[in-house]
Every structure is written in structure tokens, then in C-alpha cells.
Image (tube, helix red, strand yellow):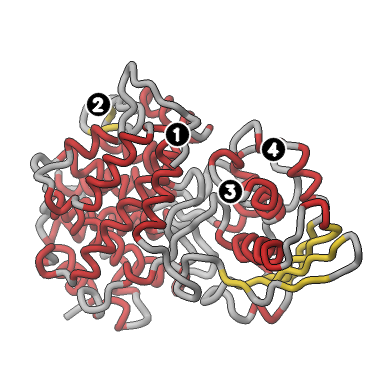
Amino acid sequence: MSHTDCALNFITNTAWNELPGSVQHQSKRCFLDALGAQIAGHQTPIGKIMADTVEQEFNGREATILVRGNKSSASGAALVNGFAGNALDIDDGYRDITGHPGACILPVALAAGEIVSGVSGQEFLTALVVGYEVAIRAGLIRHATYETYHSTGSWGTIGGTAAAGKLFGLSREKLSHALGAAEYHAPIAPMMKCIEVPSMGKDSIGWGCMVAVMSTIMADKGFTGINPIFDDSPEEQWIQSLGQSFEIMSLYFKPYACCRWAQPGVDGTLKIMADNRLQHKDIKQIKVFTFQESAALCTNYPQNTEEAQYNIAFPIAAALLDGEIGPAQVLAPRLFAKDIRQMMDKIEIIPQDRFQKEFPQKAESEVEITTTTGKQFLSGVMSARWDLQTTLPTDMELEKKFLWLTSPVLGKTQAKSLANLIWNFDQEKNLDKMIDLCIVHSGAKINHNEQC
């Protein structure tokens, strides 16, 4: 059996009641986490710009722009919701492909789930699993066959199309064309250029989501695509393991709204502070020893949200002072705060070969703090939290993160209702209630100071 046939079989034949219980539960965890990032992401400058743009340029009534509740074409809704999903850089990831599958899957599934009437919760969650599994395999192949480190959109588009094609119920022939069209039209964006000079283009996820929806719709109408990426796989097991090995179980999650590469430095700094009962005023210098890609993150004062996220000094300083790195830190006015900038001036980033040798399988750093009295403290080697190398988050921790992100947008009561719905989403007959809970309704009074 060819790799393409194997992939098509997996997409078309996978059923909810045949998935392992652990995978079924993980689909809800991923749904909760990705949706929380997306809802909060709509409050960022890029979220608002894209919502305005889509409302102007993508006429239609097929799918919902989350939070606002306005309708647009399905491709337009996927575009804006896709940009929002990665706007805070707090969405899930997969280490070996250095990218974010969930943000490319969920917005596409949401759009497809509104086009196709009567999609049940089980069907939707199954499509998410299919999308994750295909996206991760596509990412492995893309990285193995292209020399340049490309953005998530370059391979996540293919996973998004698999999820949409599953919900559309495309025939094997049309599904193959949709996947081929998605690969051919996916944004092939050089990721390091956006890390070196951060922009709103970020991980090209928004465009990838739009391409995925368009590829599915066009194939359904008879558009033909190239032979999809699967037969390019240099490793047979990557594709033949579909349906047997579930890579959705190997994701990492993010507690902070910043690049994953900066997060070991954040946790190392906080560890030293807590273990030695240090105060901010005690710090003379912070050194972060790390791998080259992490060291390539900017250390200048950020001028916008994207620069704050693709920075290594800013999140360390913000976490020291605020105890968190979320929307409140990476958005104005805190983004420009004097005390954060003064703390950034004390931070030095040093690349070392010992960490480079482990990357990308491991993303590790070590922190050294020198106090004003001359004492030095080392964190030891640190990996980012909520990873396979550390400890994955519990359901309670993921829900707490979800409420932290969504309560300021939806209100605590509505956010909690949405979380409860997602944990039981396999019992839902359709998507209507879930979509409604993702919208701030006219006249709703939200206390933005509510704490979870």
C-alpha cells in the first residue's frame, strides 16, 4: 500500500468509537487549549486587524468570526480565527517539527463544521485527531525534504485540510486532490526571518488555515491537486503508523505567551528566585546559557506584541515582576513599562554548544543569577514546563489556563460554561451551543478584573 493510500484510509476510516480512550480525552484537552488561545488572541492588534479585514474583504454568511460573532465566508473565518489562534504564541506544539499544529487545525475544523450541517461533537473531535496526526506527519516530511526551517503554515495546512475533508465527507479521490492542493498552495515561509525581525506574519498559520478551507471547497467542486506529500516521506513508519501510534499524545502545552525557546530561561529564573528567596532588588545580573536559536531571539525593548513574544529578555523580566506572561504583559500598556525594561538591561544571553547538541529534540537552558552582594546561583539545566521532558499539565491546570485567557473576554461565567461544554463535547449533537459561547453578545457586561 502506498503512503498516500495509507493516509487516505486513516482520514476516511477513523471513527470516534474506535479511538483509544486516552486519545479521545486528549482531543478535548487540545480543543480546550487551542480554543482558549484563539479567543484571547482576538483581543490582540493582529486579531482586530484581521477581523476588520475579513469583514471588509470576505463577504459571506457561512462561518463565524469568534468573539465578535459576525459572519463571513468560510475561508475568511478560518483566516481571522487562524491568526487569532497563534496571536499570543500560547498554543500547543510538537517538538520535532518546531511548530504549532493545533492553531492550524481548529480554525479550519470550526469553519468546515459550520458549512456542513449537523456535525456532532464526536465527529468534530474525530476530525481534530485526524488533523493533528496528518499535520505532524506532514511536518516531519516537510522538515526532512526542505533545507530551510519553514513555518507551521507550510505543513499545518495539510493537517487542516485533512480535518476539513473528514467533516466534508470527501471521497478518496477528492480528498487526495484537496490534500495536494493544500500542499501546493501552502505558505512556504522562512521562519527564522520572522524570528529575527518579528512581524504579524508570525507562523503563517492564518494563511495556512485559509488555504486549507479553500483547498477542501475547491476539491469538492472538482479542482485537481498534485500527488500529496505522503509519498515523499523518507521514513516509512511516519505514515504507516497512522492509526496505530497517536502523535497527538506527544504534544507540549505552553504556560506563557512567548516563544517556547525563551521559556526554559523564564522557569530557570523563577526557580532561582523561589529557591533562594531573592527579591527583584537583589538582582545584579542574569545570564541565560542556551541554544543558538533561543539566543537569536531579540533582547531589545519590544515595540509591539510580536516583538515581545519573540524576545528572550522581555518574558524573563515580565515573569520576574508580574509572576505571569500573558495578554496583560504582551499588550499595551504593560508592554512598554519602565520597570520591565530596567530588568531587561540586567539580562545577558549566551549560546553554548552543550545545548545546541540537544536541539530540537530538547530545548534546554541554564540560568545564573548574580546578586548585588556578589552571590551566584545556578538553576541547573531547565526544560520548558508542560513538556514530555518535564511534566505535562493536568486537566485542572489546562482549564485554569483556559479560564485565565478567556474570562477577561467572555466573562467568568460564560468561560466556565464553555470549558464544561468542551469536557463533555462528545455528547453534543451539533456545534451551535459551542459557537454561541465563543461570542461576546451585545449588551453583555464583562468585569475585566474578574480573577479565576
Q: How far apart are marks 4 and 1 (CA)?
A: 24 Å
Q: Residue at x 32, y 45 (%)?
A: 107
Ranked by sequence position, the earlier of labels 2 and 3 is 2
Q: State the SS at label 1.
A: helix
- Nearer the camera: disc 4 or disc 1: 1
Numbered tag placed on residue 85 in the rendering: none
- Nearer the camera: disc 2 or disc 3: 3
| Residue topped by disc 1 | 408
Please state which of residues 18 and 141 is positioned toward the viewer in this rendering.
Answer: 18
| Residue topped by disc 2 | 60
Ranked by sequence position, the earlier of labels 4 and 3 is 4
Numbered tag placed on residue 325 in the rendering: 3
Residue type at mark 3 is Ile
| Residue topped by disc 4 | 303
Mark 3, Cα crowd under 10 Å, few <14 / some 14-19 / many 20+, is many
Hey, which residue is sitting farthest top in the picture?
Answer: 443
Q: Distance between the residues labelled 2 and 3?
A: 37 Å
Give the quadrant of residue 440.
Answer: top left
